Amino acid sequence: MKVFFRKKWLVNFFLGMMLVCQMASGAQEAYPAKPERPLLLEYFRDFVIRAGQTPLPRLIEELTGFTHLINLLHTAGKPETVIIAASGQASAQLQPDRLRILTTNTLLFPWPFYNDQAERIAEFEKLARSVSPDIIFLQEVWDNKSLQLLLRRFSDYHAVIMPNPLFNLGGLMIFSRIAPVRVTAENFPLTLHHNPEELIARKGILWAEIKLNNRQVWLATTHLYSASGEASFRPNPVQFQHLLKRMQAAPGLVIAGGDMNLEPDELESYLPENILRDDCNLPTAGRRIQRKLDYVLAADTARPSGIKIVGSRVEWKKRFSDHHALLAEVIFSPQP
């Protein structure tokens, strides 16, 4: 009997080791988890960050009023937003009291950062088709070639973008099975302490209004400043609180999704009672996917008690970015 249990223990041990090895090998990806910056850009970025840690920004601000000037230029007029109507046939039927939301950071930087965008977009499409979302929120779609490829692959969805000859402003994109009736966008304020990528990116919030079963529904996607809790400069909490105020001010139902760059404990400390978030705390981001940074939020100012978020889960099936996609279903009451 002792020999039997000893052998059984050994079998279980080796089976467990095989499973761990299989999981470890499956977690390795064919592309890096972070964009590789050209060396010159890396030197420039380091120089700007080091300069920002000196009294130089404050001196420049006092002498020139730089922050006021750059924000005046940055926020002068709303960013151009464009609706691209669906040209393909819808593959799923809408339900009148719920919307299936998929949100992800796609990490679609242009060459020379990456040259595998087409392959990764193909992987993302396989994932999206397998879960059939009604709404897709995308962040970090910077590359115009990737933008056009996404539009072709998801031609059965209506698309909302912020076009620009150089890159997709804000990196934001919304796909919707329902035709938007109104779209708008806004930029977050800038300071001299923002790193070079954030200064160029012009991050903000992309909004789209749709009508479902006579209900007004506002959709919003955003990508907040990337800064950890230990960083000395962290505008992302302020940006998040701005998003919450805008959600509370919007009439009717509001659904938002994006890369908030905030972990659950901190994010929940800012959430008011009338705004819900997905209930999935599994990690969505990081080189080895160890942090929860992506969320779906929902609020209904007309009927706060008539809304809930269910079925929240991280989609692990396809790896196409340094983030996994987050899926959630928002259920709401019919129009009173």
Image: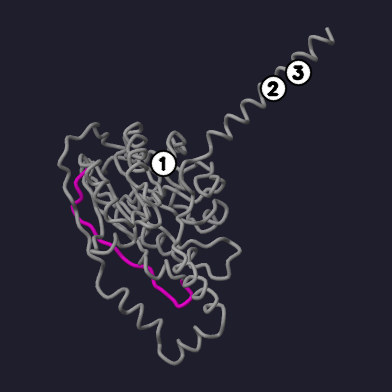
Q: Which residue is mark 1?
A: 308
Q: Position of residue 270 (x, y in %)?
A: 51, 59
Label 3 amino acid?
Answer: Trp
Does residue 298 show up magenta in the picture? no
Q: Residue furthest top?
A: 1
Disc 3 to disc 1, C-alpha distance:
46 Å
Q: Position of residue 75 (x, y in %)?
A: 31, 73
Residue in the image at 27% along x and 75% along y? 76
Q: Residue furthest bottom?
A: 63
Please give left or right for residue 185 compared with residue 61 in the image. Answer: left
Disc 2 to disc 1, C-alpha distance:
44 Å
Q: In the rendered structure, which disc, 3 or 1, sits on the residue that comes first in sequence?
A: 3
Q: In the rendered structure, which disc, 2 or 1, sits on the residue that comes first in sequence?
A: 2
Residue in the image at 45% along x and 69% along y? 40
Q: Position of residue 273 (x, y in %)?
A: 47, 53
Q: Which residue is mark 3?
A: 9
Quadrant where the N terminus lies?
Answer: top right
Mark 1, residues whose alpha carbon is within 10 Å: few (<14), some, or many (≥20)? many
- Residue 119 in which image quadrant: top left
Q: Is disc 2 in contact with disc 1, using a CB cutoff of under 8 Å?
A: no
Q: Is disc 3 in contact with disc 1, using a CB cutoff of under 8 Å?
A: no
Residue 14: give its label: 2
Q: Principal SS element in the magenta part?
A: loop
Q: Position of residue 207 (x, y in %)?
A: 29, 57
Magenta region, residue range: 178-194
